[in-house]
Amino acid sequence: MKITVKRFLKEPLIYFLLIGGGFFIAFDYYGPSFVDEQQTIVVDRTSLLRFMQQKTKAVDQAKLIRSFDGLSIDKRQTLIDAYVREQALYRESKALGLDKGDPIIKARAIQNLEFITQDYSEAVTRVTDKQLESYFAENKESYYVEPFVTFTHVFFDRGSNGNDSAKNLAEKKLTELNNNKVSFSEGIGHGNRFPYHVNYVERTPDFVASHFGKSMADKVFALPFSNTSTDTQTWQGPFESPYGYHLVMLSRREEGRTPALVDVAGQVFQDAQREQIRENLEKTYQGIIDTYSVIIEDING
């Protein structure tokens, strides 16, 4: 497909990529001096109220004003920063012609600018091995692998049998299951119907506790286990839950661990890249905002 120079130069994306690259270079080397003092954003009470109304979709004007006047200093500053950001990005998007022909002009123009900036940031982002190692070291807790268990259980319902009877039935069944070497898959043919599942595969403590209560979950995760064939063929219990009594055959248990970087390198790379893109975007947006002078007028009622 042949693209002429004239057509190439008409593409807004080309201009933005050049401008975006310029922003990165200019703000790295020139900082605050890269400011056009003729560009001014005025922040006043009316503008902030209108901006807040657009964001909250509030229809009760009196309630909106009360909410605005009740904002803390930090929340009011956050609102001002968001307003200034929107104004700066909208003006830049207009300068690039991204608002033309769009019925929802301001919101869509800003969105267009953000999409293009995102594409640019992704194109220039490079995560080095050193950055990858540094990111992993700072965020190891995010990759922690929770302990988990795989087990099946035979249930005896307290509601239909009564507490003492349910416990006695469980104790008798425990002997029967082990004497007859009832397997993991055969356990489903014994006991009463449980409200949730029969088999639990690679489930975390929180998940098990949500079905059996924390007390029983703690006992299941504390069972002696070495992943040997003998361990995985033994029924244990009874364990009490809010529903009744359970006999458990544990077939797998893994301790919680923090993996080595090599084990989660792909995920860490994506997360580090995403973080770097976010930082680049914020730097670019802040660079755009810094080209404007912001005047804050009296915003109190």
Image: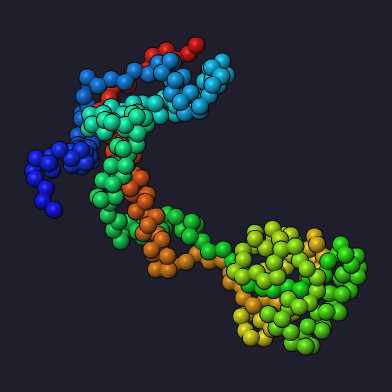
In-front residue for pair 243/78: 243
Q: Identify the residue at image location x=33%, y=48%.
A: 277
In-front residue for pair 133/246: 246
Residue 17 percent coordinates (x, y): 20, 42
Q: Identify the residue at image location x=28%, y=31%.
A: 101
In-front residue for pair 209/62: 62
- Residue 102's image quarter? top left
Q: Identify the residue at image location x=54%, y=17%.
A: 61
Residue 261 percent coordinates (x, y): 41, 65
Q: Which residue is situated farthest in the bottom direction here?
A: 180
Visible residue check, residue 74: no
- Residue 156's image quarter? bottom right
Visible residue check, residue 61: yes
Q: Identify the residue at image location x=75%, y=62%.
A: 195
Residue 274 percent coordinates (x, y): 37, 51
Give the side of residue 176 with respect to residue 142, left or right: right
Give the side of residue 270 with respect to residue 207, left or right: left
- Residue 242's image quarter? bottom right
Type of colouring: rainbow
Q: What is the total number of numbered labels drawn onto the structure image?
A: 0
Residue 108's place in the image compared with 231, above or below, is above
Residue 146's place in the image compared with 17, above or below, is below
Residue 161 percent coordinates (x, y): 89, 67
